[in-house]
Amino acid sequence: MTSHDPIVIAGGGVGGLSAALALAGIGRASLVIERAPAFREVGAGLQLAPNACRILRNWGALELLTGAAVAPEMVRIRRGVDGADLAKLQLKNAEQRWGAPYVNVHRADLLSALLEQARKSELIEIRSGSALTGFIEDERGVAVTYRCDGEIRRAAGSALIGADGLRSLVRSRLHGDANDKPVYTGHTAWRTVIPADDLPEPMRRPASNLWLGERAHLVHYPLRAGKVINVVALVEDSWRGEGEGADFWDNHGDSKFLLNRFKSWTREALDLIGASESWLRWPMFDRPPLESFSRGRAALLGDAAHPMLPYLAQGAAQAIEDAQALATALAARPDDAAAALADYSAARKTRASRIQQASRKQGEIYHLSGFKAFARDMVLRASGSNRLLARQDWIYSI
């Protein structure tokens, strides 16, 4: 097989569609295999930092989010028990500081923008309702099997990219280590979207809000031109449930649990939580870092390579960065897919792993209690906006 053969991409989410767009940008064809029968509206809000927006702009996808995305004027950090302000990080000059905007979008809107761009390209083929079942690779290329309409079908390409999420089949075949399994972190995210008209004016302002508390925190910000408010409550708990194959986006939760869990918090926060009775529970899993994101003509991308806990809001952004790095590596070695994928892995592993680890650490900081929480709050208050923003430069300015 040659560089003219398509690159097979397992997974049609943010990572998979990003990979297809990046590859089309260098003139490479791709075949995206997506198990969902249709691209439906799942998930909730995403905070897209400048490192992601810069790449989306280059693909022509960022402009498609105009009207749906909300550019927050600040990140407001507050203490949960009394609502006291700890810090306000000004984002009005995000474009000037980092070379691209900082926006909040609904995950479905981002997927729609990526899908719209993908469908414009003759180099991208998307087969939905198709679940990868296996693959083999050798020095000539890859051959994959997938289930569609109850039948096993086959496809071939010059390489395989596993953008198939936390429970990646591609990862399990590349790295058969018994210890390389998704592990529950002890944290669960509760998500809801509330009509903006159901909330008081302060909750509707264009800001990303972060409330800190003991073993829990709360995030909320407007989406879709301010018409809805995305709310995420993240708590440490002893969740026990189905592991393999669980569809976390459809795992409904009882709002009474949340009201009880946050009962010591300020009334403003409780009113926000109580404004919705429809919550989805998302138990958060993690996987150990990998030594390499590739082997031969197969490679991993996004959560399949480095699942990100949400505490730095970099999950989607890092998948988008992966896609751009993948295209760069393949453009440099168009006739040697295995070497290109090894270059991609080398280019991405250090940065992605560092952000993966930093996200874990940030969650610990958010959930501190006692004297450690007091010290954290004092540091936040004393630091000021510019100093706190400077801590993100290494992530946003790439």
Image (spheres, rainbow, N blue to C red):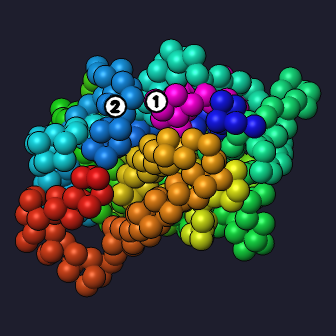
For label 2, the crowd category at 10 Å Cα-Cα, with few meaning under 14, some 14 to 19 and many 20 or more, is few
Q: Using the image, determine if residue 95 lies above or below residue 227.
A: below
Q: Residue at x 66, y 63 (%)?
A: 182
Point out which mark residue 58 bears: 2
Q: Residue at x 13, y 54 (%)?
A: 88
Label 1 environment density (alpha carbons within 10 Å; few <14, some 14–19, many ≥20): some
Asked whether the beta carbons under mark 2 and mark 1 sit within 8 Å of each other, the answer is yes
Kind of residue indicated by mark 2: Asn
Q: Residue at x 62, y 43 (%)?
A: 335
Dividing the picture into quadrants, the one containing residue 287 is: bottom right
Q: Nearer the viewer, residue 366 or 319?
A: 319
Residue with the most extreme bottom position: 371
The verdict on residue 167 being magenta is no
Q: Quadrant of the N terminus?
A: top right
Q: Is residue 50 visible?
A: yes
Residue at figure coordinates x 73%, y 64% from the top left: 175
In this picture, is 49 found above or below 61? below
Confirm whether the magenta stretch covers residue 40.
yes
Q: List the residue tagged with mark 1.
A: 25
Percent coordinates x, y for residue 110 in the rendering: 43, 30
Q: Secondary structure at mark 2?
A: helix
